[in-house]
Image (tube, rainbow, N blue to C red):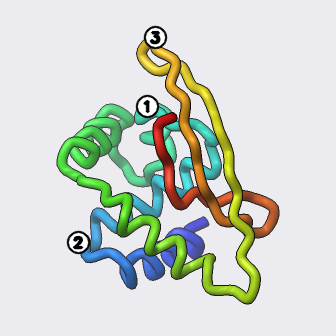
Amino acid sequence: MQAMNKELENQLRKHFSCDKRRVSLVATLILGLLKLSQSSLSKWCKTLTGERSLEARYKQLQRFARFFRFSSKLYAQFIWREYGQGKEVYLTLDRSEWKMRGKWVQVILVGIAHQGMSIPIVMADA
């Protein structure tokens, strides 16, 4: 798992200009999300390594989420460079519904089919 984390960090550094700690945290979060298939900070903090308590890891994730601004344009460019450069690219289209804060939200995702799964590129509220 450590080798996979380092490789992902190296790939992310090629595309994003963040400091080493943030790149490391993003890589760990991506791998944690893939492992857990859940998206709450309380679950993600369990995937972070180190001697710190769960509460300290949770606070680290809160600070990261508060100050980190995600660029959907940079993300789409990154995914396209990594997975969209083959001879044939298959795009996927998915519509989902989730209940968030008591309200139903419809989401449309466009992704790239890669090794039996879809990697999202663009998301829009329906």
Q: CA distance from mark 1 to mark 3?
A: 20 Å
The reply to whether dot 1 and dot 3 touch (C-beta < 8 Å) is: no
* Near-viewer residue (83 or 43): 83
User: In terms of secondary structure, where does tag 3 sit?
Assistant: loop
**In the rendered image, which residue does mark 1 sit on?**
42
Taking 101 as reference, is 112 left or right?
Answer: right
Residue 98 appears at what percent x and percent y? 57, 25
Instruction: First in sequence, mark 1 or 3: give its number.
Output: 1
Q: Amino acid at mark 1?
A: Ser
* Near-viewer residue (124 or 70): 124
Residue furthest to the front in view is 126
> Which quadrant holds the N terminus?
bottom right
Q: Amino acid at mark 3?
A: Gly
Residue furthest to the right in view is 116
The residue that appears at 55% across and 30% down in the rendered structure is 106
Question: Mark 2, mark 3: which one is toward the viewer?
Answer: 3
Q: CA distance from mark 2 to mark 3?
A: 37 Å
Whether residue 73 is situated above or below residue 45 in the rendered picture? below
Q: Which mark is residue 19?
A: 2
Whether residue 9 is situated above or below residue 29 in the rendered picture? below
**Residue 119, image quadrant:** bottom right
Q: Which mark is residue 102?
A: 3
User: In terms of secondary structure, where does tag 2 sit?
Assistant: loop
Label 3, residues with CA under 10 Å away: few <14, some 14-19, many ≥20: few
**Residue 63, image quadrant:** top left
Residue furthest to the bottom in view is 87
The reply to whether dot 2 and dot 3 touch (C-beta < 8 Å) is: no
Question: Mark 1, mark 3: which one is toward the viewer?
Answer: 3
Q: Amino acid at mark 2?
A: Asp
Taking 53 as reference, is 2 left or right?
Answer: right
Instruction: First in sequence, mark 2 or 3: give its number.
Output: 2
